[in-house]
Image: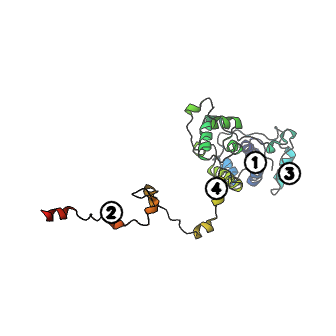
């Protein structure tokens, strides 16, 4: 549904100058009925000057009179040819001027911690352009030495739900295409049920890895004939035989 310009200011004018119900004003201005009630009580939109929808060709006096007579009727916004296609406009998210200097830090964070995100996804999340993202990826940005990665959610550039949705979408696409995994890793990839049914693979501690083939003589052929007791028993004719001779 098309909404008038300056919805709250229009609602203020309608509350002050008409006998329309709160529901009718709320429906026309895209507000909650309780919010319109707050405007009438002076608790909401304090200090906002009313915006005349008749003088700005958004309503006619006849339309207001019609709805005043019928509380169940809804106001119809006058057609404005200049507004055609405005709701379908696509492009980067609008970023307030006070937060625009934070976008490079947010891009650096997304590039570092979520490399699976495409440039188009990053652009939609923080409201930036592909050349800017590419310059931070390549570290050719003019201020790259002073850019510190910061979570865009913490900066207020996007919501956590939007970031989670973008990451989930990118991860799903990467899993479907096998992007980022080697051929060997893709061959070993199994489902969760299969992995739970698999037996544990015996492993040696890393500090003794390789010692299973080690022999004192350096000859693997003598492994089967090696007597462990010979490593600890003293040879015959040792120290005790010498004492007997004395």
Q: Nearer the viewer, mark 4 or mark 2?
A: 2
- Comes first in the chain, label 4 or label 3: 3
- Comes first in the chain, label 2 or label 3: 3
Q: Which residue is mark 1?
A: 29
Provide the secondary structure element on which disc 4 rests: helix
In percent of width and height, residue 231 lies at 33, 63
Please give the label number shown on residue 231.
2
4 and 3 marks in contact (CB < 8 Å): no
- Tell me if mark 2 has few (under 14), some (14-19) or many (20+) residues whose alpha carbon lies within 10 angstroms of its own: few
Location of residue 227 with respect to 24 vertically, above or below: below
Provide the secondary structure element on which disc 3 rests: helix
Q: Report the side of 238 relative to 221 (left or right).
A: left
Give the Cα separation between the discs numbered 3 and 1.
17 Å
- Comes first in the chain, label 3 or label 1: 1
2 and 3 marks in contact (CB < 8 Å): no
- Tell me if mark 4 has few (under 14), some (14-19) or many (20+) residues whose alpha carbon lies within 10 angstroms of its own: few
- Comes first in the chain, label 4 or label 2: 4
Q: Nearer the viewer, mark 2 or mark 1?
A: 2
Provide the secondary structure element on which disc 1 rests: helix
Q: State which quadrant residue 223 falls in.
A: bottom left
Location of residue 173 with respect to 92 vertically, above or below: below
Q: State which quadrant residue 235 falls in.
A: bottom left
Q: Which residue is mark 4?
A: 184
Q: Residue at x 67, y 37 (%)?
A: 134
- Which residue occupies the extreme top position in the image? 142
In percent of width and height, residue 56 lies at 81, 38
- Comes first in the chain, label 2 or label 1: 1
Q: Nearer the viewer, mark 4 or mark 1?
A: 4
Q: Which residue is mark 3?
A: 66
Q: Report the side of 136 relative to 31 (left or right).
A: left
Give the Cα separation between the discs numbered 4 and 3.
73 Å
């Amino acid at each position: 549904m098309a909404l008038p310009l300056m919805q709250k200011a229009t609602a203020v004018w309608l509350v002050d100058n008409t006998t329309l119900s709160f529901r009718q004003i709320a429906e026309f201005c895209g507000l909650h009925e309780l919010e319109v009630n707050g405007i009438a009580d002076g608790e909401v939109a304090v200090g906002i000057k009313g915006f005349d929808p008749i003088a700005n060709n958004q309503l006619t006096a006849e339309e207001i009179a019609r709805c005043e007579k019928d509380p169940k009727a809804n106001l119809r916004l006058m057609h404005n040819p200049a507004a055609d296609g405005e709701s379908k406009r696509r492009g980067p998210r609008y970023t307030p001027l006070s937060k625009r200097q934070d976008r490079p830090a947010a891009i650096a964070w997304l590039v570092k911690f979520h490399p699976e995100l495409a440039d188009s996804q990053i652009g939609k999340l923080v409201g930036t352009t592909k050349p800017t993202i590419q310059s931070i990826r390549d570290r050719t940005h003019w201020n790259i030495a002073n850019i510190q990665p910061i979570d865009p959610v913490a900066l207020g550039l996007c919501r956590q739900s939007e970031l989670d949705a973008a990451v989930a979408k990118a991860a799903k696409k990467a899993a479907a295409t096998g992007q980022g995994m080697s051929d060997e890793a893709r061959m070993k990839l199994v489902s969760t049920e299969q992995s739970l049914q698999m037996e544990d693979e015996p492993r040696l501690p890393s500090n003794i890895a390789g010692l299973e083939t080690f022999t004192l003589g350096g000859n693997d052929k003598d492994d089967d004939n090696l007597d462990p007791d010979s490593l600890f028993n003293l040879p015959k004719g040792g120290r005790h035989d010498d004492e007997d001779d004395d």
